[in-house]
């Protein structure tokens, strides 16, 4: 159990039988009143963000969270098939709701880290994907740079191997490997080929 003032950023708690991640907290005291902890909590199931104030007498149960590596096999429609790392027979589909934008950054055969919530009955539930901040992907489509429009810089829309479209500088060509920020979806640089 966590006391009201231990409920801080990057902690996972359970409220109403649902796991939440604490994304913001602020302990404050107003004049003669007892201190309170005003928090913003993000549901690991639905993704919704709520505000909740914990009084000094409140406690919260810490959620049983773990990490698990899964290998991406393929997608069909809005089903994305994975298997447990090291056990190809343990296959199962995940929906777009669980994967979210992560499907734009992973390729078949990639190992991906997931957050797992274990409830009181010992049942595991995948609550999200833990992508690195930057990923490197190959450009499969890029319009040619037109002579004369490179003097002042400029950008063009390129397509990655995963189907993701990214705004990149004019000098990026098909076959180039570029680095992309997974939080913003923006181009961060070209990767030199070894």
Image (cartoon, rainbow, N blue to C red):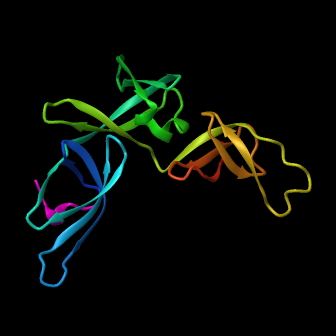
Residue 42 location, x and y as percent? 33, 51
Q: Look at the picture and state if 192 lies above or below 55.
A: above
Give the magenta part as a residue range.
1-9
Q: Quadrant of the C terminus?
A: top right
Residue drawn at the location 60% of the way across and 48% of the way down: 179
Question: How many numbered discs sit on the rendered protein?
Answer: 0
Is 7 colored magenta in this rendering?
Answer: yes
Left or right for 178, reference 157: left
Q: Is residue 74 above or below residue 157?
A: above
In magenta segment, residue 66 = no
Percent coordinates x, y for residue 183 in the rendering: 50, 51
Of the pair 168 and 61, the residue shown nearer to us: 61
| Residue 194 makes an appearance in the image | no
Percent coordinates x, y for residue 138 in the rendering = 65, 38
In this view, the residue in front, 176 or 22, is 22
Farthest bottom residue in view: 31
Q: Is residue 39 left or right of residue 2?
A: right
Q: Is residue 150 above or below residue 146?
A: below
Q: What residue do we see at 17% from left, 50% from top?
A: 62
């Amino acid at each position: 159990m966590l006391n009201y003032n231990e409920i801080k950023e990057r902690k996972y708690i359970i409220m109403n039988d649902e796991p939440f991640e604490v994304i913001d907290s602020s302990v404050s005291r107003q004049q003669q009143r007892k201190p309170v902890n005003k928090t913003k909590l993000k549901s690991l199931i639905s993704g919704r963000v709520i505000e909740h104030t914990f009084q000094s007498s409140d406690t919260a149960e810490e959620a049983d969270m773990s990490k698990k590596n899964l290998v991406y096999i393929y997608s069909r429609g809005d089903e994305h098939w994975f298997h447990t790392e090291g056990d190809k027979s343990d296959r199962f589909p995940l929906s777009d709701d669980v994967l979210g934008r992560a499907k734009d950054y992973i390729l078949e055969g990639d190992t991906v880290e997931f957050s797992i919530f274990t409830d009181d009955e010992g049942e595991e539930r995948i609550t999200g994907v833990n992508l690195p901040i930057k990923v490197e992907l190959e450009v499969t489509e890029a319009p040619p740079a037109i002579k004369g429009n490179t003097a002042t810089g400029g950008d063009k829309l390129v397509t990655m191997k995963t189907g993701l479209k990214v705004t990149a500088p004019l000098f990026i060509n098909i076959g180039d490997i570029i680095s992309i920020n997974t939080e913003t979806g923006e181009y961060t640089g070209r990767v030199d080929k070894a």
